[in-house]
């Protein structure tokens, strides 16, 4: 069930889930959420916590253990290189028909990205990333087994570099892990980029002059901003898809802050840090111009949409260019946000994403 807040709790016409809203109301930068969880949005403490110890294999998302074993470092790097090749190749190929962007966001662009980047893979590999399959554990297991037996062949023509890693696996464990990597990498990429693009679209629309909204805006295509890259960085500040990071076990952090006890879990909140008035001027304003001329946004203090040194995102260089390309297709094809005109929900999910309905031309 998605938790939603009463309509009174808003910014940028967003209605946050009550638990997110509770967090947004916190003024302290280190606070207790419940008897065993401490929340942190202090810039320095956050960096110290991330640096205090390497991320545990069980805390990882893409590279958590698969097929009963940790993912070896060289296979992790092969995966990220393959994903990079596939994204760059995808960005250069013509996108699928833009009507695929019509429907419920962020689900429509998630499926659209999967089709764009990974549908060339032969069956059954391409089924690994299909939404109807990934939502069912039983279907996922059946497809996993089918891919293990039949990972495709060179004779079938073009396939992605990620699919090649499945086919080229040297033993059954490596193949099973490559299958898990394919599924997780494609899901993390498509879900994350769709969330980011949707959040940007919503914030850009709210930024319009009052006389353009809401009546006429609902019938007019969304307009491409002059500096789309800056709009995406500002979206990563105000509505970061990776809004909360988790560290289990407080032992490594007790010396860093008196509130943290050995038995505590620690929740790190880029979402709160990115809007704290101690770190940002007009923190709740969506102002893409903050990023104009900033060569490396990630060197900005109190900004960590892709993590800090120590556990920084391996795919960060792919996310913004792909989101930019996706939004360009949307703008070029007259995407219109249809509903809601006001007050879009932001449910409690591991990825922060605004929900709305949109329609695009062909
Ligand atoms: C919009 C998309 C994405 C966002 C916003 C994002 C954000 C982040 C953040 C905030 C961290 C730090 C996590 C922590 O310290 O706990 C992180 C780490 C990481 N991300 Fe991403 N990420 C995205 C997509 C991806 C994709 C597509 C991949 C790879 C397939 C990936 C691979 C990693 C890896 C390997 C780490 C380092 C943590 C570890 O060693 O497991 N990310 N990401």
Image (cartoon, grey):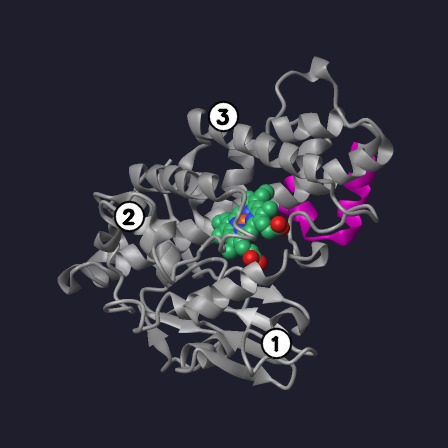
Q: Residues within 10 Å of mark 3 (few under 14, many from 20)?
A: few
Name the side, left or right, on which 92 lies relative to 143. left
Image: 18 above or below 138: below
Q: Are marks 1 and 2 in contact (CB under 8 Å)?
A: no
By secondary structure, the bulk of the magenta-drawn segment is best described as helix
Examine the structure image and report whether residue 286 is included in the region drawn in magenta: no
Question: What is the CA distance from the residue labelled 1 to the residue labelled 2?
Answer: 38 Å
The residue located at (38%, 37%) in the rendering is 325
**Which numbered tag is attached to residue 230?**
2
On the image, which quarter does residue 3 sit in?
bottom right
Of pointers 3 and 1, the one earlier in the residue sequence: 3
Examine the structure image and report whether residue 137 is included in the region drawn in magenta: yes
Name the side, left or right, on which 79 lies relative to 39. right
On the image, which quarter does residue 224 sit in?
top left
Name the side, left or right, on which 61 lies relative to 166. left
| Quarter of the C terminus within the rendering | top left
Q: Which residue is mark 1?
A: 254
Q: Position of residue 241 (x, y in %)?
A: 47, 57
Q: Secondary structure at mark 1?
A: loop
Q: Which residue is mark 3?
A: 89
Q: Position of residue 308 (x, y in %)?
A: 49, 55
Q: Which residues are magenta?
A: 128-147
The residue located at (63%, 46%) in the rendering is 131
Question: What is the CA distance from the residue labelled 3 to the residue labelled 1?
Answer: 46 Å
Q: How many marks?
A: 3
- In depth, the one of 143 and 304 nearer the eye is 304
Q: Secondary structure at mark 3?
A: helix
Image: 36 above or below 127: below
Q: Position of residue 321 (x, y in %)?
A: 40, 38
């Amino acid at each position: 069930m998605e938790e939603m807040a009463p309509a009174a709790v808003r910014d940028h016409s967003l209605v946050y889930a009550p638990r997110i809203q509770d967090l947004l109301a916190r003024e302290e930068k280190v606070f207790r959420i419940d008897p065993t969880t401490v929340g942190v949005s202090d810039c320095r403490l956050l960096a110290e916590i991330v640096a205090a110890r390497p991320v545990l294999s069980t805390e990882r998302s893409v590279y958590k253990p698969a097929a009963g074993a940790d993912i070896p470092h060289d296979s992790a790097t092969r995966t990220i290189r393959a994903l990079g090749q596939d994204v760059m190749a995808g960005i250069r190929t013509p996108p699928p028909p833009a009507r695929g962007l019509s429907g419920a966001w962020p689900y429509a662009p998630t499926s659209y990205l999967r089709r764009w980047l990974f549908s060339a893979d032969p069956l059954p590999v391409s089924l690994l990333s299909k939404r109807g399959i990934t939502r069912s554990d039983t279907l996922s297991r059946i497809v996993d087994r089918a891919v293990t037996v039949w990972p495709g062949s060179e004779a079938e023509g073009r396939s992605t570099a990620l699919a090649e890693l499945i086919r080229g696996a040297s033993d059954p464990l490596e193949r099973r892990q490559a299958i898990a990597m394919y599924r997780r990498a494609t899901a993390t990429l498509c879900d994350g980029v769709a969330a980011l693009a949707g959040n940007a679209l919503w914030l850009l629309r709210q930024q319009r002059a009052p006389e353009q909204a809401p009546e006429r805006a609902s019938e007019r295509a969304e307009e491409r901003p002059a500096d789309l890259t800056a709009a995406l960085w500002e979206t990563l500040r105000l509505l970061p898809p990776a809004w909360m990071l988790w560290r289990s076990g407080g032992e490594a952090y007790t010396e860093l802050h008196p509130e943290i006890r050995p038995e505590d879990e620690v929740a790190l909140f880029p979402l709160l840090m990115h809007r704290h008035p101690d770190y940002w001027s007009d923190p709740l304003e969506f102002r893409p111009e903050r990023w104009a001329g900033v060569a490396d946004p990630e060197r900005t203090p109190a900004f960590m949409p892709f993590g800090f040194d120590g556990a920084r995102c391996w795919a960060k260089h792919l996310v913004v260019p792909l989101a930019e390309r996706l939004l360009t297709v949307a703008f070029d094809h007259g995407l219109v946000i249809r509903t809601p005109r006001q007050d879009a929900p932001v449910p409690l999910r591991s990825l922060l994403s605004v929900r709305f309905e949109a329609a695009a031309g062909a």
